[in-house]
Amino acid sequence: MIYTGPPQNSIRKKIDSQNVIEAHALLKMNNIISENCIVHAPYIINLASPREEVYKLAVDFLKLEISRVKELGLKYLVLHPGSCLTLPRDEGTKKIIDGLNKVFENDNSNVVVLIETMSGKGSELGISLAEIKSIVEGVEKKNKIGICLDTCHLWDSGQDISDPDLFLKEFKKYLDIDLIKAIHLNDSKNVFGARKDRHDNIGYGNIGFEILSKWVHCQEFWNIPIILETPYFWFENKWKPPYKEEISMLKNNSFKDFKK
Ligand code: FE
Ligand code: FE
Ligand code: ZN
């Protein structure tokens, strides 16, 4: 997963086509198909905002971001649906739907926006399968929309994820599982249903290794990119990325304390 610029602001550098060629060569060298290289939209996009200027910026910025994903030769763009702040939740949801339809209206790219399941922190929307369903079903161009499941967010929002097959059974009551195009695999620093959103390293949080490993080995997810968004850890006087260790533990389906 990549960002096309800093996730916290709207400063964007023009995309250099030479870099794109090099990046695709790198993907190929590492046996990663370009479709599995996911882009995450910046956090400042809030389609549910009651403030007109924030909403307008969100629509414009999302259009721009889609054109950048297209330029990069990539397909999927993960988006946080938004926070409704002072608005009632259903009105916030309506704004998200209208915003997405506006964005997709004149979009001729094959970029697909993936709505991420959220934790329920503050006034976030998209924190239950019912809310995700209303957003997805409101989008007119069905080929433009998909879903990204985030295990930490699902857990924090109070969705039972202890068995991925049972979760999918529940999911099917709301939406088609083919809509799931990416997974963010994270442990959680918080207890079930805490609505907090703080990621932890795989096997170090409250979800635990066993459940997260089940998600990785679930057959339904074999063709879906599974992305770690786990924090760096302090090791031998510096911050270290955990990904190599976490991936190897998950592949071997056995936990190993890599922090000591
Ligand atoms: Fe996210
Ligand atoms: Fe995520
Ligand atoms: Zn998160």
Image: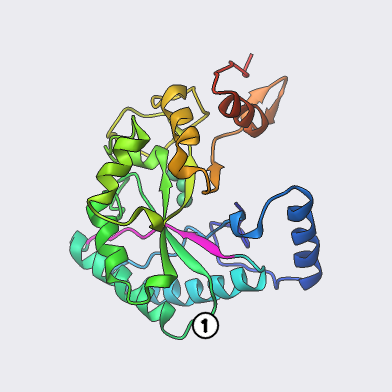
* Left or right: 84 as drawn, with respect to 6: left
Q: 10 Å neighbourhood of mark 1: few (<14), some, or many (≥20)?
A: few
Where does the magenta region start and end? 75-86
Point out the quarter of the image occupied by ligand 3: top left
Amino acid at circle 1: Asn
Residue 49 higher or lower than 228, as above or below: below
> Front-most of 122 and 141?
141
State the image coordinates of residue 85 (x, y, percent, origin top left).
27, 59
Q: In this view, does 180 lie to the left or right of 128?
A: right
- Residue 77 within the magenta-colored segment of the rendering: yes
Q: Position of residue 73 (x, y in %)?
A: 66, 69
| Rendered position, 172 above or below 232 | below
User: In percent of the image, x 43 and y 78: which residue is there?
Assistant: 103
Residue 256, image x, y percentages:
59, 16
Q: Is mark 1 on a helix, strand or loop?
A: loop
| Colouring used for the render | rainbow
Q: In which quarter of the image is the C terminus?
A: top right
The residue under the point 39% across, 24% down is 206
- Kindly give the residue lying farthest to the top in the view shown: 260
The question of residue 92 being in magenta is answered with no
Horizontal side of 248 relative to 189 (left or right) equals: right
In this view, 32 is above or below 42: above
Q: In which quarter of the image is residue 109?
A: bottom right
